[in-house]
Image: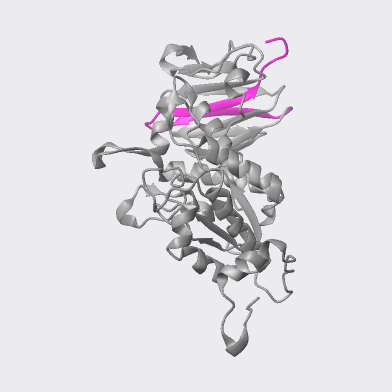
Amino acid sequence: MTQRCRKGALTPLFLLFALAPNAPHAEPAASLPPTRIVIVGDSTASPYGPERYPRMGWGQVFDRYVDAGLPVLNRAQNGRSTKSFIDQGWFDGVASELRAGDLFLIQFGHNDAKVEDPQRYTDAATDFPANLRRFIGIARARGATPVLMTPVARRQFDGEEPVDTHGAYAERVRMLARSESVPLVDLARLSMDWLRALGPDASRAQYLHVAEQGLADDTHFHERGAVQVACLVAADLKRQSLLDPAHVVRDTDCGARADSKRALATQRHPSQVLREESIAREQPGPHGGNGTTTAYPFFAEVPDLPWFLRKRVLHAGAGIGLHQHVHDEIYYIVSGRGIYTLDGREYDVTAGHALLTRTGSTHALRQVGEEDLVVMISYMKPQGR
């Protein structure tokens, strides 16, 4: 939508900004390339070179969630607020490349709150929303879809509860999304729910805490944290039908509910971690099998758990005798080598083989060679256990 005034000069951008909020939305032309994702924001989203690894912004890794048919243009800039992004010309650059069909993700707030820096500070009630309206206006003028995002949470806790450090700025984004009828990804809340579930200790690994580099940064992300935050964004875009699932190349089942801690109180029996040496049982080969085995019945006594997991180690010469199945069962060979007899046929099995025995089949297993045969076995518990 290039506009020209007399003598061929381009219409000033400030005039376009003034007109854009009331301009009709442009319809994507049939000849346009596939929809793209364009990201603007600050250092929590911006890209970094390999020399800064493992520091990464969530926008830098967002393309890991979508296929090549949905290009990602990450135009976020380290250290910028809405004010400095506009004043330094980054806004003009993005405005010139936006086009119809783009999904335009807008995440600011971290640096807008820096009252000590007049080059970046914006008032949460006035300048900040006014600047965001300019982003919304140019998107609509170009036929793109603007999406406002609240700023991602810093890793700051009061006991076990994450602290909202973006208060008025996050709330102003929410208010603006409602008043301008703009989709909202409430990343502040999503990331605080994620932090709450992780807790103060486990969350440290998601941020830029790298002892060997002398880094203890609770604002910026380690690669693993950037990937998790990108997942939160992708999941919410998909939930709102802003991201076509056909373009999504990995699962987005990530994060936690706001009531994740409260949900623990409703568990009849807690989750747990079990060390196998605490449950080891020396047993003869089961079902009439030869030799000696060691069984590890994981969570066999846990109530209300419908399935069963057993590790069985078949020592030299040991075996599981032939027996007919009254339930479905899966064996997974962890290490070693064995001969598996299934419905009258023998199979040479080794690490990485998975064996499914259905109800009615007969099977047997014997260890061969010098190495113990280690098997993980999964099946449904008998009724009443």
Residue 376: within the magenta?
Answer: yes
**Residue 234 x %, y %:** 60, 48
Res. 260 in view: yes
Residue at (48% x, 12% y) in the render: 283
Q: Along the horizontal axis of the image, is 123 left or right of 32?
A: left
**Residue 54 x %, y %:** 35, 47
Residue at (53% x, 16% y) in the render: 297
**Nearest the eye: 171 or 104:** 171
Residue 367: within the magenta?
Answer: yes
Q: Along the horizontal axis of the image, is 358 left or right of 219?
A: right
Disc tally is: 0
Which range is magenta?
360-385
**Nearest the eye: 188 or 381:** 188
Q: Quadrant of the N terminus?
A: bottom right
Q: Along the horizontal axis of the image, is 251 left or right of 28?
A: left
The colour scheme used to paint the residues is one colour
**Residue 37 x %, y %:** 59, 60
| Relative height, residue 42 to residue 337 (above, below) | below
Which of the 4 image quarters holds residue 266?
top right
**Nearest the eye: 247 or 127:** 127
